[in-house]
């Protein structure tokens, strides 16, 4: 199967709706063709600026308008961030992502501090990622110059379902930021959340948007909603593992080379359920006891899972190392 960017909605829908075991088999076969199925990328996500966000994302405990008990913290100091990045590296992470609860990046002293953080983490030999809201083309270029490897900007859901979840920025705003990141030569990380009351067609629609971008995102996080008290989605029920498997498998089939990240929601998934997700094509996780403000399995738990399943962490910058070997005919 070749890589394609001209999927139709109906093609993706027919994949998504296949009998589950057939879908998993096809996804696993494609995963084995394009990737090393025995390795999983281990990422760490640190909130460098927490809470007080002016947006109204219905799932998010960091929105200032919701009473979720999240304490607002200003931007962390450089030394603290570098210390956390070092801890993540020692624990086995190869990608370190810094998140800030901003609507958009602004050209101020905090952005200058973030650029310094990117430089510092990059010097540790980690792939550096940021998720900080909307970016201009110029800001993306500055992050690239500082050594940023990847930028996360999730679609969250499909274009049709979008206004039921967020009203403070548009779906096109998100696509514009992804475009600015791509123009700057930064790796794109973009996915979404299931379990927010969306239909199957909405889930398919989100995959359709990602799979028909001019270049597929290098990373696609698939999140299960973690319902937080105080948010509009506090009463939503947890999605089943089979819903996660169906999403992951469809992403894997439509975007064969993409890193498919099993993201939020893992704390409630036993190893047996996570194993099904890896079989369906997931090959990346967030490790560490928190995802911004959301609880997550510990490094120790994840390494025990890796041992049980025969998985190993993917090395940093592997894509670039392979490309260099090919270029040098090694």
Image: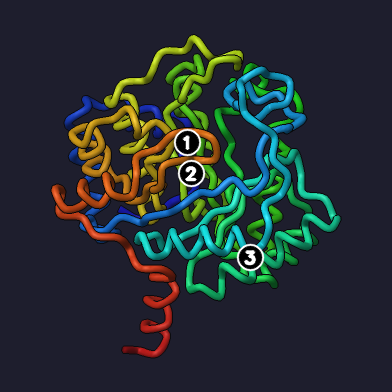
Mark 3, Cα crowd under 10 Å, few <14 / some 14-19 / many 20+, is many
Question: Marks 1 and 3: which is nearer the front?
Answer: 3
Please tell me whether mark 2 sits on a helix, a strand or a loop.
helix
Task: Look at mark 1 in the image and give the residue it sits on.
Answer: 207
Please tell me whether mark 3 sits on a helix, a strand or a loop.
helix
Q: Quadrant of residue 314?
A: bottom left
Q: Position of residue 43 (x, y in %)?
A: 43, 54
Q: Residue at x 46, y 25 (%)?
A: 225
Q: From the viewer's perspective, tell me whether residue 263 is left or right of residue 37.
A: right
Please tell me whether mark 1 sits on a helix, a strand or a loop.
helix
Q: Position of residue 299 (x, y in %)?
A: 33, 50
Q: Residue at x 54, y 49 (%)?
A: 46
- Mark drawn on residue 211: 2
Q: Residue at x 54, y 45 (%)?
A: 190
Sequence-wise, the earlier of marks 3 and 2 is: 3
Q: Residue at x 44, y 60 (%)?
A: 87
Name above or below for residue 214 compared with residue 322: above
Residues marked 1 and 2 touching at CB (< 8 Å): yes
- Mark drawn on residue 64: none
Instruction: Pick whichever, 17 or 121, lies toward us.
Output: 121
Question: Marks 3 and 2: which is nearer the front?
Answer: 3
Instruction: Pick whichever, 24 or 212, lies toward us.
Output: 24
Name above or below for residue 136 compared with residue 192: below
Q: From the viewer's perspective, tell me whether residue 35 is left or right of residue 295.
A: left
Q: Position of residue 35 (x, y in %)?
A: 28, 59
Task: Look at mark 3 in the image and give the residue it sits on.
Answer: 118
Q: Position of residue 50 (x, y in %)?
A: 66, 39
């Amino acid at each position: 199967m070749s890589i394609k960017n001209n999927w139709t909605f109906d093609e993706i829908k027919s994949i998504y709706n296949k009998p589950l075991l057939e879908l998993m088999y096809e996804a696993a076969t494609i995963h084995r063709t394009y990737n090393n199925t025995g390795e999983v990328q281990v990422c760490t996500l640190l909130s460098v600026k927490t809470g007080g966000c002016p947006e109204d994302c219905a799932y998010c405990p960091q929105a200032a308008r919701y009473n979720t008990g999240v304490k607002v913290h200003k931007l962390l100091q450089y030394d603290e961030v570098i210390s956390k990045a070092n801890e993540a590296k020692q624990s086995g992470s190869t990608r370190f992502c810094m998140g800030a609860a901003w609507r958009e990046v602004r050209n101020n002293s905090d952005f200058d501090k973030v650029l310094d953080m990117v430089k510092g983490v990059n010097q540790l030999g980690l792939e550096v990622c940021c998720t900080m809201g909307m970016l201009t083309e110029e800001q993306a270029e500055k992050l690239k110059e500082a050594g940023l490897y990847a930028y996360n900007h999730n679609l969250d859901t499909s274009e049709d379902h979008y206004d039921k979840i967020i009203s403070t920025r548009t779906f096109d705003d998100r696509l514009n930021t992804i475009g600015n990141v791509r123009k700057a030569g930064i790796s794109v990380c973009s996915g979404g959340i299931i379990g927010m009351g969306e239909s199957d067609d909405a889930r398919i629609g989100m995959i359709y948007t990602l799979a028909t971008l001019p270049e597929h995102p290098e990373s696609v996080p698939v999140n299960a909603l973690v319902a937080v008290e105080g948010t509009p989605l506090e009463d939503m029920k947890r999605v089943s593992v089979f819903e996660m498997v169906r999403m992951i498998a469809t992403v894997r089939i439509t975007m064969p080379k993409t890193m498919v990240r099993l993201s939020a929601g893992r704390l409630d998934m036993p190893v047996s359920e996570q194993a099904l997700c890896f079989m369906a094509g997931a090959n990346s996780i967030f490790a560490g006891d928190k995802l911004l403000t959301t609880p997550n399995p510990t490094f120790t738990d994840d390494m025990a899972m890796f041992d049980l399943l025969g998985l190993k962490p993917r090395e940093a910058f592997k894509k670039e190392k392979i490309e260099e070997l090919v270029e040098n005919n090694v």
